[in-house]
């Protein structure tokens, strides 16, 4: 049945079915390998990313697993040294056991593009902006270098969002999303996706979705399809809030530095403007406080609960030294700039004056 013609429902229903009658017009058979709610979300995400295909997964980590599972023993992957922590852990603790080796380098520095030509990797894995230092990598330039040695480039596009950056259009083969973050935007569901123009890669992703059991639930897909409708509006507000927030922080005494790609003080500001429509909602700063003072400050915030994750309409903050990077030894953490006073803010869509008053009051109290 065509649900729209026969019911007039404006919004697609949730297809809570595990199986489909053989020979149906949609070509569905079993929800592990496809469902109308997956297909609906896949079409929307592909359109947002400006590419042909998208494949949805249960989480961002499932999407990463799907891509890496397409490699074979002996393959080498060259990765940006600042990739998402769970990406690093998956390679180190799981895929290295299967003979896939990972080479890390700072791909924000063009000198290190040589690693790509040297290793001729099966995959080049980058992220831009990076977490939590918001380094910006030149997606077009890296894709150009990789093309010469036939290495596909995958960009983890989670921090930028599909609305602000379209990696496949910039020359990457794959764009990966944790749809948990800006795509859904409401911090109430986990999801992931891999987007591409390559029919061959799409086939590999659909295979991984069913063969590894990485598929999302129809209901979660429905929720993300609902969230994604406001992605453009949310990203505009995240961006304008975050820029004002970053500017005000930069003009605050004691604050050592503020990192935000759309601040002129960002080392890759020009590149950010070339490849991104706007800045997203993430701002990282060194408040210049000791560990105790930073924790006192964070404890006083009312609008910024201390929590991992990002990209929801509500603001959050994260203290890398005691949270995401707590297991990294102090010297290693400080070598990449994560001192005790560093805080990553996920600026939400609240009124900027409410957010800023909260920061000022907590600063005074601390
Ligand atoms: C959150 C995140 C992931 C993992 O996504 P989950 O949905 O939590 O599994 C991957 N990459 C980046 C950059 C992320 O922020």
Image (cartoon, grey):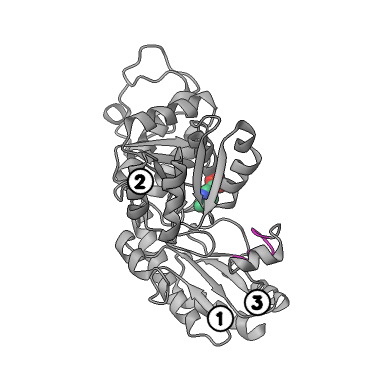
Spatial CA span between label 3 and label 2: 41 Å
The residue to which callout 2 is attached is 172
- Identify whether 290 is placed above or below 15: below
Q: Which residues are magenta?
A: 318-325
Query: For the residues marked 1 and 2, what is the alpha-carbon distance in whole angstroms?
Result: 35 Å
Circle 1 packing at 10 Å, graded few (<14), some (14-19), many (20+), is: some
Check disc 1 and report the residue beneath it. Answer: 256
Looking at this rendering, what residue extends furthest in the left direction?
Answer: 5
User: Looking at this view, is 116 or 238 the one in front?
Assistant: 116
Residue 262 locus on image (x, y percent): 38, 70
Residue depicted at x 45% and y 46%: 118
The mark that comes first in sequence, 3 or 2, is 2
Residue 313 picture location, percent across and down:
47, 60
CA distance for labels 3 and 1: 16 Å
Q: Does the residue at mark 3 contact the one at mark 2 (Cβ under 8 Å)?
A: no
Circle 3 SS class: helix
Q: Is residue 120 above or below residue 256?
A: above
Q: Earlier in the sequence, mark 3 or mark 1?
A: 1
Task: Single out the mark in the foreground, 3 or 1.
Answer: 1
Q: Is residue 46 left or right of residue 29?
A: left
For disc 3, the marked residue is: 297
Residue 313 falls inside the magenta stretch: no
Residue at x-position 38% and y-position 76%: 264
Quarter holding residue 300: bottom right
Residue reaching furthest front?
118
Q: Position of residue 56 (x, y in %)?
A: 44, 36
Image quadrant where one finds the N terminus? top left
Which sits earlier in the primary sequence, circle 1 or circle 2?
A: 2
Q: Secondary structure at mark 1?
A: loop
Mark 3 crowd level (few <14, some 14–19, many ≥20, 10 Å Cα): many
Q: Is residue 184 visible?
A: no
């Amino acid at each position: 049945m065509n649900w729209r013609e026969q019911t007039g429902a404006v919004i697609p229903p949730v297809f809570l079915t595990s199986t489909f009658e053989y020979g149906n017009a949609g070509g569905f058979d079993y929800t592990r390998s496809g469902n109308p709610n997956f297909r609906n979300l896949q079409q929307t995400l592909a359109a947002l990313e400006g590419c042909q295909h998208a494949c949805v997964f249960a989480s961002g980590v499932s999407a990463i697993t799907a891509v890496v599972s397409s490699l074979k023993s002996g393959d080498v992957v060259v990765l940006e040294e600042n990739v998402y922590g769970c990406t690093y852990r998956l390679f180190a603790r799981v895929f290295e056991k299967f003979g896939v080796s990972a080479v890390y380098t700072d791909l924000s520095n063009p000198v290190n593009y040589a690693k790509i030509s040297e290793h001729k990797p099966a995959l080049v894995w980058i992220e831009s902006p990076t977490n939590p230092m918001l380094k910006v990598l030149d997606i077009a330039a890296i894709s150009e270098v990789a093309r010469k040695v036939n290495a596909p480039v995958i960009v983890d596009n989670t921090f930028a969002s599909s609305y602000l950056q379209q990696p496949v259009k910039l020359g990457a083969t794959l764009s990966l999303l944790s749809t948990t973050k800006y795509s859904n935007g409401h911090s109430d569901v986990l999801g992931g996706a891999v987007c591409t123009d390559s029919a061959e890669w799409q086939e590999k992703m659909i295979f991984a979705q069913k063969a590894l059991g990485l598929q999302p639930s129809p209901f979660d897909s429905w929720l993300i399809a609902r969230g994604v409708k406001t992605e453009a509006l949310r990203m505009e507000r995240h961006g304008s809030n975050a820029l004002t927030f970053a500017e005000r922080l930069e003009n605050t005494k004691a604050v050592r530095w503020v990192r935000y790609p759309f601040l002129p003080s960002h080392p890759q500001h020009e590149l950010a403007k070339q490849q991104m429509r706007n800045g997203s909602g993430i701002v990282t700063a060194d408040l210049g406080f000791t560990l105790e003072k930073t924790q006192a400050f964070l404890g006083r915030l009312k609008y910024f609960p201390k929590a991992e994750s990002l990209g929801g309409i509500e603001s959050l903050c994260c203290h890398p030294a005691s949270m995401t990077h707590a297991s990294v030894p102090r010297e290693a953490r400080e070598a990449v700039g994560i001192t005790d006073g560093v805080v990553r803010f996920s600026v939400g869509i609240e009124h900027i004056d409410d957010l800023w008053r909260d920061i000022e009051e907590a600063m005074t109290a601390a």
